[in-house]
C-alpha cells in the first residue's frame, strides 16, 4: 500500500473515531434510558424536523451564532419547542445577551429539564425540552436579575407564536 493511501485511510479512521466519540459523548438527548411523553423513532424525527432542527434537537448540535431570526424577535408571545410544540419561554423573560442566540432569564414552569454536559472538557448545564427531550441549549449563571440565569437557546430548536 502506498504512503499516500495509508495517510488517507488513517485520517478517515481518525475522523470516523471522532464522529463516533461525539455520538457516544453527546448521544441523543432522548436516549432509550429516558422516558418522555412525546417519542418518535429516529426515522420519524428525521421526517418531522429539517436537517438543522434534527442536528440540534436530537443530536445536541449547535446552530451558528447570530444566524437565528429569533435572536432579534421583539414581539410579545411564546417560544415553544420545535420538536413537540411545548411552550417553553415567555417573551417577557427574553433579553439581548449579545451572544448571538436567543436568551431568556427564566423558562415557563414545568417546561424544561437540565442535566450536566461535560463535553469538550468543560462542565455546563444542558437544557432539554421536558416533553420530548430535545436539546435546546445551555443555562449559565451570568444572566440578569431577578434570576441571574441566562438560558442560551438555539433558535432553530424553538418556534415563536406571537401574542394575539
Image (spheres, rainbow, N blue to C red):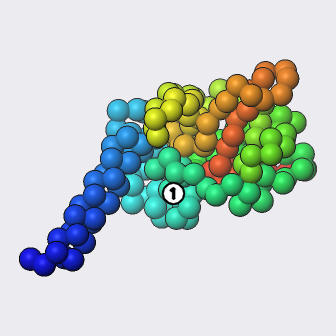
Please state the horizontal and vertical placement of residue 141, each as a whole percent of the image: 70, 25
Q: How many marks?
A: 1
Q: In this view, does 10 lie above or below 110?
A: below
Residue furthest out toward the front:
3
Left-right relation of 2 to 72: left
Residue drawn at x 70%, y 35% as measured from the top left: 151
Question: From where the camera sits, is residue 119 visible?
Answer: yes
Q: Is residue 62 above or below residue 109?
A: below
Q: Which of 1 and 15 is in front in this view?
A: 1
Residue drawn at x 54%, y 43% as measured from the top left: 135
Left-right relation of 8 to 111: left
Question: From where the camera sits, is residue 160 visible?
Answer: no
Residue drawn at x 48%, y 64% as measured from the top left: 47
| Quarter of the image with the N terminus in it | bottom left
Please state the horizontal and vertical placement of residue 56, each as a whole percent of the image: 54, 52
The part of the image, by quadrant, that contains residue 6 is bottom left
Left-right relation of 48 to 103: left
Q: Nearer the viewer, residue 43 or 54?
A: 54
The part of the image, by quadrant, that contains residue 70 is bottom right
Q: What element carries label 1?
A: helix
Q: Residues within 10 Å of mark 1 (few under 14, many from 20)?
A: many
Please state the horizontal and vertical placement of residue 145, each as a whole percent of the image: 85, 23
Q: In this view, does 56 lie above or below 115?
A: below
Residue drawn at x 89%, y 50% as measured from the top left: 74
Please state the horizontal and vertical placement of residue 104, each as a whole percent of the image: 77, 36
Q: Which of 66 and 48 is in front in this view?
A: 66
- Residue that badge 1 annotates: 54
Amino acid at each position: 500500500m502506498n504512503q499516500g493511501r495509508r495517510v488517507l485511510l488513517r485520517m478517515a479512521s481518525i475522523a470516523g473515531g471522532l464522529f463516533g466519540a461525539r455520538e457516544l459523548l453527546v448521544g441523543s438527548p432522548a436516549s432509550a434510558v429516558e422516558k418522555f411523553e412525546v417519542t418518535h423513532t429516529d426515522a420519524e424525527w428525521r421526517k418531522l424536523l429539517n436537517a438543522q432542527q434534527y442536528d440540534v434537537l436530537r443530536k445536541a448540535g449547535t446552530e451558528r451564532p447570530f444566524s437565528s431570526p429569533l435572536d432579534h424577535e421583539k414581539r410579545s408571545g411564546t417560544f415553544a419547542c420545535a420538536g413537540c410544540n411545548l411552550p417553553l419561554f415567555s417573551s417577557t423573560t427574553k433579553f439581548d445577551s449579545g451572544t448571538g442566540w436567543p436568551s431568556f432569564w427564566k423558562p415557563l414552569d414545568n417546561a424544561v429539564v437540565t442535566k450536566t454536559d461535560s463535553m469538550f472538557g468543560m462542565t455546563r448545564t444542558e437544557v432539554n425540552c421536558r416533553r420530548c427531550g430535545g436539546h435546546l441549549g445551555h443555562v449559565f449563571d451570568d444572566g440578569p436579575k431577578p434570576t441571574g440565569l441566562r438560558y442560551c437557546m438555539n433558535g432553530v430548536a424553538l418556534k415563536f407564536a406571537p401574542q394575539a
